[in-house]
Image (cartoon, coloured by chain):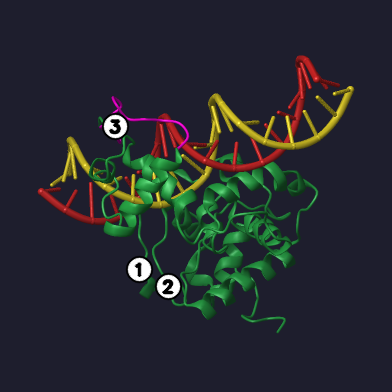
Chain colours: A green, B red, C yellow
Amino acid sequence: MVRTPCCEKMGSKKGPWTPEEDQILISFIQRFGHGNWRALPKQAGLMRCGKSCRLRWINYLRPDIKRGNFSKDEEETILKLHRVLGNRWSTIAARLPGRTDNEIKNYWHSHLKKRLKQNLISPKQQCDIVQALIHSDHNSNATIHKPVCNSTHQGIQNHPQDTPNFPPKSCNESTDIASENLPGIEGKYETRDFAAMEKMNYENCSNVMEFWYNILMNSGNSIEMQENSGH
DNA sequence: AATGATTTCAACCGCATGACC
DNA sequence: GGGTCATGCGGTTGAAATCAT
């Protein structure tokens, strides 16, 4: 399949945004919103492609962007979530209000990456993180985010791309699992999440906690665990 | 002060996915 | 069912800033 380019290559400006361009984009979005990014630059009178406008808005111009240094709490949150989720920056960003996936990704590569190797956590700690995720989701009515199946029995240390045979070849169809079939879990699953689920057999799990824990541990076996354990 | 090395981060690129026709 | 479009995501790049010598 031949894809058309996301924007006209000819005449589309690249490189750093000027304050004037920023102002045009902000004014336009404040007046008309951003229903169609592809059409936006033409309508707003910007010599940029829609993709560039979208990125500029999301990563820099949005009014709710929190700028400045990361707090200790934010740092810890990123570290913990990364252990569970891997390089799923947008999922991590969703839990840090005002921070963008790009910002977190940059911060990770420039500041936090070095700490990863010397800071592996135990399965018990992973379990704690999963509990925290689930409880925060229950409290906020947010969607439970899906960790990737890339852990080892030593604790999660690999990224998906570092994991051989991941995702499994047998799970290549894009299968959505409706929330009604997965009590306690909202939303759809990505293919690789389904792959993880297929591996550990969801039916063997008695609760959400166990389900996530099994995914994290990349285990085909059920484990004994009670939701809210330790409380 | 000069300069080369390293770090930071905004922006770009290519790919995946879902929606629509 | 297949093609196209629109969007979102993660990886990468490269210019600017900062640091070390």
Left or right of residue C14, residue A63 in this image: left
Mark 2–mark 3 Cα distance, whole angstroms, equals 39 Å
For label 2, the residue is A182
Q: What stretch of residues is rendered in magenta? A: A3-17
Q: Is residue A8 left or right of residue A120?
A: left
Of labels 2 and 3, the one closer to you: 3
How would you rate the neighbour count of disc 1 (Cα within 10 Å): few for under 14, some for 14-19, many for 20 or more?
A: few
Q: Chain of mark 2?
A: A
Q: Which residue is mark 3?
A: A5
Mark 2 secondary-structure assignment = loop
Question: How far across and down, in percent of the image, does residue A211 sit?
Answer: 55, 69
Callout 1 secondary element: loop
Task: Give amino acid for label 3.
Answer: Pro
Q: Quadrant of residue C11?
A: top right
Number of the label disc, if any, that sits on residue A228: none
Q: Are marks 2 and 3 on the same chain?
A: yes
Task: State which chain disc 3 sits on.
Answer: A
Q: Amino acid at mark 2?
A: Leu
Q: Is residue A154 left or right of residue A51?
A: right
Which of marks 3 and 1 precedes in the sequence? 3
* CB atoms of marks 1 and 2 within 8 Å: yes
Q: Could you say which is closer to the camera, residue A146 or residue A69? A: A69
